[in-house]
C-alpha cells in the first residue's frame, strides 16, 4: 500500500497523466478560426486541425462522462476513485467546461 504524500510509482503517475490529459482535452475551446482558443497551452494542439481538436475534445468528454470499462481500468491503475474523476468532469460540464486544473486535488 502506498503511503500518503508519497510520490506515485512511475506507472501510477503515467495513468494519472492520462486522466489529466483527458480532463484538459475535455476543456478545449475551439474558436471559429483555424487555431485553438488562447486557453490551449499544449504544443501538440497547435499543429492539429480544428476538426481534430473538436474530435479530441468530444472523445475526452464521452470517455469521462459515459460508463465504460477503459475509464474504470485507467482510474484503478492511477489509484484514483472513478466516481471522483467523473464528479470533476460533471462539475466542469456544468460550468461550461471552464475552470481546468480544478482536478489537481484528486490526482
Image: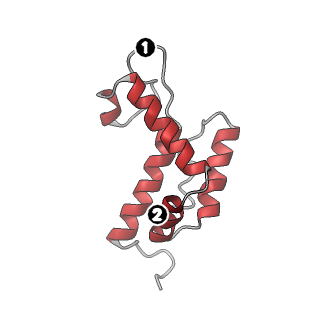
Mark 1 neighbour class, 10 Å CA radius: few under 14, some 14 to 19, many 20 or more: few
Q: Residue at x 35, y 24 (%)?
A: 49
Q: Residue at x 49, y 41 (%)?
A: 59
> On the rendered structure, is 77 left or right of 48?
right
Image quarter of residue 61: top right
x and y percentages locating residue 36 in the rendered image: 42, 24
**Which secondary structure, mark 1?**
loop
71 or 13: nearer the eye? 71
88 or 68: nearer the eye? 68
Q: Reply above or below: 20 against 11.
A: above
x and y percentages locating residue 96 in the rendered image: 65, 33
69 or 96: nearer the eye? 69
**Which secondary structure, mark 2?**
helix
Q: Reply above or below: 89 against 79.
A: above
Q: Which residue is mark 1?
A: 33
Q: Which dot marks residue 51?
A: none
Q: Which dot marks residue 74?
A: 2
> On the rendered structure, is 68 left or right of 87?
left
Image quarter of residue 51: top left
Amino acid at each position: 500500500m502506498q503511503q500518503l504524500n508519497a510520490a506515485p510509482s512511475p506507472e501510477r503517475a503515467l495513468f494519472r497523466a492520462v486522466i489529466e490529459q483527458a480532463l484538459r482535452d475535455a476543456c478545449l475551446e475551439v474558436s471559429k478560426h483555424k487555431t485553438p482558443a488562447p486557453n490551449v497551452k499544449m504544443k501538440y494542439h497547435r499543429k492539429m486541425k480544428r476538426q481534430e481538436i473538436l474530435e479530441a475534445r468530444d472523445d475526452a468528454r464521452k470517455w469521462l462522462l459515459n460508463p465504460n470499462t477503459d475509464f474504470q481500468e485507467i482510474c484503478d491503475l492511477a489509484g484514483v476513485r472513478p466516481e471522483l474523476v467523473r464528479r470533476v468532469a460533471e462539475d466542469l460540464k456544468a460550468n461550461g467546461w471552464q475552470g481546468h486544473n480544478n482536478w489537481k486535488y484528486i490526482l
